[in-house]
Amino acid sequence: MENDFLIQINGVNKTFPGVKALSDVDFTLKKGEVHSLLGENGAGKSTLIKIISGAYSKDSGDIKFSGKSVNFSSPRDSIEKGVAVIYQELDLVPTLSVANNIFLNREPKKGFIFQNRAIIKNAREILKKLDTNIDPFKKVKTLSVADQQMVTIAKALSQNVKILIMDEPTAVLGPEETKKLFNIVKQLKKQGIGIIFISHRLEEIYQIADRVTVLRDGEKVITTDVKNKNDPDIRQIIKWMVGRELTKQFPPKKNEIGETLLEVKNLTKKGVIEDVSFNLHKGEILGIAGLIGAGRTELARIIFGADAHDSGSIKFENKEINFRHPTKAIRSGFGFITEDRKNTGLFLILPVKNNITIANIESIIHSGIISLKQEKKKSLDLSESLNLKPLNVDITTRSLSGGNQQKVVVAKWLFTQAKLLIFDEPTRGIDVGTKYEIYKLMHELSSKGIGIIMISSELPEILGISDRVMVMRKGKIMKKLTTKNTDQEEILYYAAGGGEKSA
Amino acid sequence: MPKKINWKNIRNYGSLLALIALMIFLGIASDRFFSARNLTNILRQASVVGIMGVGMTFVILTGGIDLSVGSTLALSGCVGAWLMKGGMDWPLALILSLLLGAFLGFTNGFFIVSLNIPPFIATLGMMGVSRGFTYILTNGAPIYGFAEGYRNLGNADIFSIPIPAIIMLLLYLVYFILQNRTKFGRFAISIGANEEAAFLSGIPIKKYLLLFYMNLGLLAALSGNVMAARLDAAMPTAAQGYELDVIAAVVIGGTSLSGGQGTVIGTLIGALIMAVVRNGLNLLLVSTYWQQVIIGFIVIGAVAFDVLNKKIKN
C-alpha cells in the first residue's frame, strides 16, 4: 500500500522574505492518478511545484518519493527520481529538429559522433506511443503550439518519467487539442505515471482529475476525490479557492444592443482569412470561437490596421474605413487587448501611468509639453475605477499580477475613449476572482454602448459573456449563433469542421 | 514633487558619485587637476563626446545603436571646411554641414527602417562609407585655416566658460525637456521597452526611428564643426574610434543597451567621466596606447554593471 504513493509530502513550510509561501502543506500523489492542484495566483501552487522539482528547497517538513525521504537541492536530483515538469513556456530549442529536441544532451553517440539514425528511430517510437504523427525531422519552430507541447511530453517520456507535472498545459490549446491531450494523459495514467495537473479552467478537472487539492494563501484548504460533475460542485471549489462565496462565475448581463457599429464585408487576406462578413452593434459582445490557428487573432489585427488585407470592406459608424496603421484605428476609437499581454500589450519595464496614457498621449500634451500632473491624475483615476491593486501608478507594470496587468491594458483603452474593443483571450492566465472582475468590466463597458469583440478559446466564457457567437475555422466563418440558443457541443461541432461543405 | 529614491535614481547617483570620487582622486594625485585651465579644458574635451552622446542616448533608448558617428563627424566637418575653403561664408557652410550630418543619419535610419537591416550592421557599413568619402574629398590631407567667427565656435569663452561647453550644456537642457516632457522622449523609451506594444499603441515607429537617427547625425555634424573650429583644421582622420567613447558615455550614464531605460543627464555625467578619465590619464603621463586599453575595459565594466543590475532586478 505504501508503495502506491509516488509522492508523500507532510507539513512542508516555505517562507520568502516577507511572505509565507507555504505553511504546513500536505500533498500526495499516487501511481496512475491525475491530481489537480488548484488555487488563485499566489496561492502557493508554483512554490509547491518548485519544491517537488527541486528548484526551491523546503524550510521544514518531510518529502517522501516512493516511500523514501528525500532532500532535493537542485532540479537535477528530481530529474533522477523521474520527475518532469512541463511549463507553460515550453523549453524547446526552436531551430533543432523534433528528434534532436527529445534527446537533447542525451544523444546516443559513438565517441564524439551522434548516432543520428538511432536518435530518429527512438524519437519515432516515442511519438508513436503518443499516437501523434509529428515528423521527427521537422524543426520545432515550424510546429503548432499543441504539437510542441506533444514534443515536450515525448521528451519527458524518453527519460522514464514517473511523475509528470503539467503547469496549465491547456492554456494555449483549443478544445480539440485539449481533448487530444487528455487522451494522452489517460494513456499515461495506465502506464502508472502520476500526474500533477494545474489549470485555471475548472471545468477541466471533471474530465481528467481523480483527486483535487485546493491551496489558498499558502495553506491547504482541502484534498478530495472528484466523483462527478456535482461532487465537488464547481461553486464549492471556487469558494474553497477564493475563501468567499462567488455565487456566479459570470456576472448578469445588463447591456442593451444598439445600432450597427461595425460592418465587415467579404474581408479576405490570402491564406489567412477568407470572405469574412459580420456586423457588430453598439453595446454588443460578439464572441469569436474556434480552434487555435482558425484566423481569429489575424482577423482582429486586420480590423485594427496592424496587418493589411487583400480585399473586402470595413465600415465603422457607417463610414468606409481602411486603416494602414494602428494609429488611425486608435484615433477612430478602436482598442485592442491582445492575447499576449507581456509581449504585445504592455511596456513591462515602464511605470503603470506610461502604459495607460501612451495610446492617447496627445490628450495630455499642451503646446508640445506632456503634463505630468494630468498624466498622474488621469491614470490614477482610471486605475481606481478599475480597482487596480496596488493603487500606485508609479511602479513598474512588471510588478503587478496578471489580472492587474490586464486591468492596466483595459485602462489604456478607456483612456483613448474607445468605442470598439477587441479582447483577445481576455482571461488567459488570470485566476477565478479576477476573471469575474474582468467579465463584470466587459459588461459595464458594453452597457455604456461600447461594442466588444471577444476572441476566446474557453467555451464557458464565450457562452457566459457574449450575446452572439461566431465560429471560425481555417480563416472562414463557419456559423453565427445566438448565445442563448446554443451550447458547447454545437460550437465545437462547427469549430471542428462540422457542417463544412464537401468540396 | 514627492521625493522618491528608486533604482533609476540610485544608478544616476552611482555615476555621479563615481565622477566625484574620480575627481577627488585626481586632485590628490596631481596638483594641476583642479586648476581653472585644466577644468575648462576638460569641459571643452567633454563637449565633442557629450554633444553626440545626447543624440546617441535616444538611439540606444530605442534599442538601437549607431557606430557611424565618428565618420559622420569627420565627413561633415571636412565638407564644411571644403565649402569654406571654396569661398563660402562660414554660417552657410556650417548649416550645409549640419544638413549633411542629418542626411547621413537619415540614411542610417532608412536602411534600418525600410530594409530592416540591424542597426549594428547598417551603421557599421555607413561608418566605412562616410570615412571613405572623407578621404576621397580631402585626398587624405587636413583642411585648415578658417575665418575667426568660425574658430570662435571652438575656442572662444563666455564668462571664461568655453563655447563648446556652453553649446553642450544648452543642448542637454533642451534634450532633458524633450526626453521627459515630449513625445520625442516618451516614444523613444516606449519603442525600446516593447516595439510591438508600441506599434499596437499607435506609435509611428518608423517615422520616429528615422527622426532619432537623423537627430544623431545632425549632432555628430555639430561636434565635427566644433572640433574643426577648435583645431582650426578639419581632419579626415578625426574622431576615429569615437563611437566607442560616445557609447561608453551613454552606458556609463546608466542607459541600458537593450533599450527602454536611461536618461540624458546620465549621459552628461558619462561624458564628463570619460573626459576626466582621459584628462587624468594624460596628467598621470599614461601613454595613449594604454589609454585605449583602459577605456576599453571601462566600457566593458559599465555594460557588465548594467547586465548585473538587470539580473538583480529580475
Image: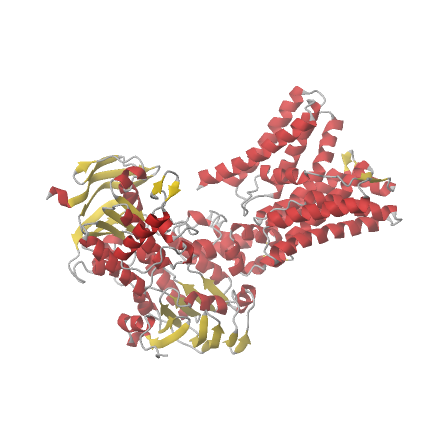
Name the spot of residue B299 as percent of width and height, x first: 59, 35
Q: Is residue B225 left or right of residue A174?
A: right
Count of numbered tags: 0
> What is the quadrant of the C terminus of chain A in the image?
bottom left
Q: Residue A315 versus residue B145: which sits nearer the camera?
A: B145
* In the rendered image, the vertical position of residue A465 relative to residue A320, given as above or below: above
- Horizontal placement of B223 versus A26: left or right? right
Q: Residue furthest right?
A: B87
Instruction: Looking at this view, name the residue that lies furthest to the left.
Output: A1
Taking the spot 55% from the left edge, 50% from the top edge, the residue there is B192
Residue B4 visible, this angle: no
In the image, residue A36 sits, relative to residue A254, either above or below, namely above
Q: Is residue A182 left or right of residue A320?
A: left
Task: Work out whether A429 lies above or below A110.
Answer: below
Front-most of residues A136 and A241: A136
User: In which quadrant of the rendered image does the N terminus of chain A lie?
Assistant: top left
Q: Is residue B35 above or below residue A436?
A: above
* Residue B27 visible in this rendered orientation of the protein: yes
In x, y percent, where is residue B249? Answer: 63, 38
Q: Nearer the viewer, residue A255 or A236?
A: A236
Residue A41 position, x and y percent, is 32, 50
Q: What is the x, y in percent for residue A141?
A: 42, 55
Q: Quadrant of residue B288?
A: top right
Colour setting? secondary structure
